[in-house]
Image (tube, helix red, strand yellow):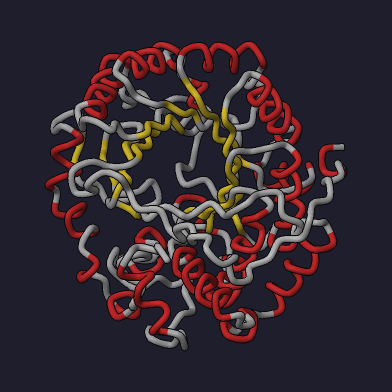
């Protein structure tokens, strides 16, 4: 069984002070391009058609394609608009629904390659993910595949996705893609149904060699608005667990931008030799997750360093285009700034009031607006909007009180340099 494969032992890792003479790696990664000029990544919702019935689905996907979707000609024009941002071109991700429901998928991937775009595909775990289909997608020019894994067993994953068999289809597609030479990102939606299962999911990610594991923190939109969320304290526990396993798997978060704050806090505490559990006030959930990770061998290093999280946020290096062509700062923030059918995507990204506003940290309200981490974090604008209808409101799932971290003197240079020691 996939969830019973052993993880090979490795020498223990340490978060202690680095050896003398060795420079510290950057704690955070900045975007290479000017974020006001071009995004780091463009996500296109190619369709909302999908055979699954996932409990958290942002798109509230349906079995059939919407006649208002961008047709092939409009989709090719969108690709040209993405390429027109210039070099370096944004990463381009084709998602859904299930993009495999579009018969022109291969044509569009090939066209993107001709335009110089680096393209990834984020399909649903369905029987369409055959070896032949993945081979064709890879040959057309897709270098990476993004798959969802929301439980380490069929019971947990299939129950969340609403269709039996999705767990097995996903694992088979994962192994096939790796065999074909594609990079695979695994996304896990963190909700109450799988909180205690997270270490087992990480073990699967480690055993099957995903290039990155992304812990996605639920945003109350679409069907996800019906699910119960985490508390702010539980979120802190999970974010610190994600940090802990960063030497076992390349780990990042989605819609949990305060992970960047946690990374900087943990850097300072490690350098000082402080107990992060006590200083950060971590709770019982964190202790359980950490104990389980140790039992599974996930505290044994397999990587030399953690994957520094990228400083990116809704509208600040990130843009989402819906199946009908409307443009949003995030797929989880349902405020439209324009439409690619009537205005070029670069014009919307660079000049719309919504996008320019979200790139201004001084517009943030509540605790986010007062926080010393606001320029490297900024909180989830999608979750803020989902719970308050104000995209500039404070992050509802953040427990941090501005100025409360006790080692501000050591923190200040990291904030000034974007996470460099």
- Examine the rendering and report whether any part of residue 81 can be seen: yes
- Examine the rendering and report whether any part of residue 53 can be seen: no
Seen in the image, is 334 located left or right of residue 120?
A: left
294 shown above or below 125: below
Q: Residue at x 32, y 48 (%)?
A: 31
The quadrant of the rendering that contains the C terminus is bottom left
Q: Residue at x 79, y 45 (%)?
A: 153
135 shown above or below 360: above
Q: Residue 247 is drawn in which quadrant?
A: bottom right
Where residue 340 appears, x then y in whole percent? 21, 32
**Closest to the observer: 398 or 390?**
398
The quadrant of the rendering that contains the N terminus is top right
Where residue 85 appears, x then y in whole percent? 21, 32
Q: Residue at x 53, y 17 (%)?
A: 138
Q: Residue 325 is drawn in which quadrant?
A: top left
Q: Residue at x 59, y 54 (%)?
A: 305
Seen in the image, is 86 located left or right of residue 193?
A: left
């Amino acid at each position: 069984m996939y969830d019973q494969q052993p993880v090979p032992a490795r020498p223990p890792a340490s978060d202690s002070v680095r050896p003398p003479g060795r420079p510290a790696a950057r704690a955070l990664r900045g975007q290479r391009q000017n974020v006001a000029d071009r995004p780091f990544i463009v996500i296109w919702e190619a369709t909302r058609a999908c055979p699954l019935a996932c409990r958290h689905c942002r798109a509230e996907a349906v079995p059939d394609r919407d006649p208002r979707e961008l047709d092939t000609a409009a989709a090719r024009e969108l690709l040209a608009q993405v390429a027109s941002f210039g070099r370096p071109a944004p990463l381009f991700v084709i998602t859904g629904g299930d993009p495999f429901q579009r018969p022109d998928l291969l044509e569009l991937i090939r066209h993107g390659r001709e335009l110089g775009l680096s393209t990834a595909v984020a399909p649903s775990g369905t029987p369409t993910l055959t070896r032949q289909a993945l081979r064709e997608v890879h040959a057309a020019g897709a270098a990476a595949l993004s798959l969802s894994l929301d439980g380490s067993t069929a019971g947990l994953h299939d129950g969340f996705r609403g269709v039996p068999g999705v767990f097995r289809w996903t694992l088979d597609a994962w192994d096939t893609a790796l065999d074909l030479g594609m990079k695979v990102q695994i996304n896990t939606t963190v909700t109450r149904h799988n909180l205690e299962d997270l270490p087992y999911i990480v073990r699967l990610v480690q055993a099957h060699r995903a290039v990155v594991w992304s812990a996605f923190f639920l945003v109350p939109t679409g069907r996800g608005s019906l699910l119960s969320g985490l508390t702010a304290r539980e979120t802190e526990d999970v974010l610190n667990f994600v940090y802990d396993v960063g030497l076992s798997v390349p780990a990042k978060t989605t819609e949990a931008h305060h992970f960047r704050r946690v990374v900087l806090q943990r850097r300072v505490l490690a350098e000082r030799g402080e107990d992060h559990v006590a200083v950060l006030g971590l709770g019982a959930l964190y202790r359980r997750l950490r104990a389980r990770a140790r039992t599974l061998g996930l505290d044994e290093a397999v990587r030399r360093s953690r994957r520094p999280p990228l400083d990116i946020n809704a509208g600040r290096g990130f843009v989402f285009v819906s199946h009908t062509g409307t443009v949003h700062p995030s797929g989880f923030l349902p405020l439209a700034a324009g439409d690619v059918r009537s205005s070029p995507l670069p014009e919307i990204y660079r000049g719309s009031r919504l996008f320019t506003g979200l790139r201004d940290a001084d517009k943030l309200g509540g605790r986010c607006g007062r926080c010393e981490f606001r320029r490297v974090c900024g909180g989830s604008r999608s979750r803020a909007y989902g719970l308050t209808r104000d995209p500039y409101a404070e992050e509802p799932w953040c427990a941090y009180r501005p100025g409360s971290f006790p080692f501000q003197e050591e923190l200040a240079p990291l904030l000034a340099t974007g996470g460099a020691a």
